[in-house]
Image (cartoon, rainbow, N blue to C red):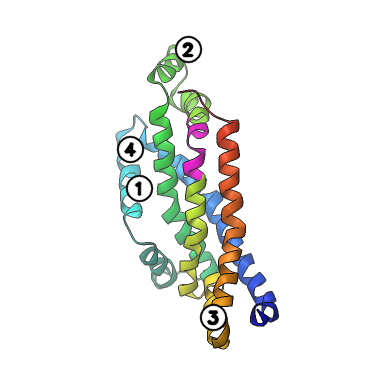
Amino acid sequence: MNAVIENLPRFIEAFGMTLWLLATSGVCALIIGTVIAAMRISPVPSLNVFASVYTELLRNTPLTLVLFFCAFVLPQLGSRLPYEWAAFIGLTLYTSPFVAEALRSGINGVAVGQAEAARSLGLGFMQSTTLIIFPQAFRMVIPPLINVLIALTKNTSVAGGFFVFELFSAAKELANANGNAVIAILLAVAAFYLVVTIPLGILSAHLEKKLAVQR
């Protein structure tokens, strides 16, 4: 445990980067995923095709490959972003299709009569989507969306392989420097992840009960 206590500032620094990646990538993925979900149900064929290709392409591409593209290919195209921002872009792009699919499942759970009623009142596609369909869909998919954020929390560890000093990178560095305390270091890193994932799980259960929708 001495190795953990002595290197606590390094753990906290790495944990801060993990939280930053989670917060920024999570928020942006929720925004982009919502837009993609709206495009998936759009009556405009070109938007529907784009959203479908975007979702299938990124959802079926390994995260490591997405981050590799952002860290090494984008600079070849003229990007000068720090590795932290490249990781942010990669995690956002990778997570947004999962958000879109979770939200689309909620949209499919909304009764067809809701959209028909909205159209009968003279509401257009954007109005019926934002005012009628999405509010109900979000309430039904809170647990899946929080599960996506929990997965994102763990996926931030992949950024450690691309020169980003987060928890996984800190574990490698400290384990190499303290070979006799590897288990303690790994347990400490696991504890930091649990500090995020367990409250998210509790929040999911609480919101699911509070915003339960009768189906």
Q: Tell me residue 112's x, y (percent).
A: 38, 20
Residue type of the residue flagged with mark 1: Thr
Q: Quadrant of the C terminus?
A: top left
Q: Which residue is mark 2?
A: 121
**Which residue is painted at 36% across and 66% down in the image?**
65
> Is residue 11 found left or right of 122 in the rendered image?
right
In the image, 202 versus 13, the foreground residue is 202
Residue range highlighted in magenta: 137-145
- Secondary structure of the residue carrying tag 3 is helix
| Mark 4 to mark 1 CA distance (whole Å) | 11 Å
Q: Which mark is residue 182?
A: 3
Residue type of the residue flagged with mark 2: Leu
Q: Which mark is residue 48?
A: 4
Q: Quadrant of residue 41?
A: top left
Q: Earlier in the sequence, mark 2 or mark 3?
A: 2
Q: Tell me residue 96's x, y (percent).
A: 44, 49
Q: Residues within 10 Å of mark 2 (few under 14, many from 20)?
A: few
**Which residue is painted at 54% across and 68% down in the image?**
84
Q: Is residue 170 among what the camera can see? A: no
Q: Tell me residue 36's x, y (percent).
A: 41, 42
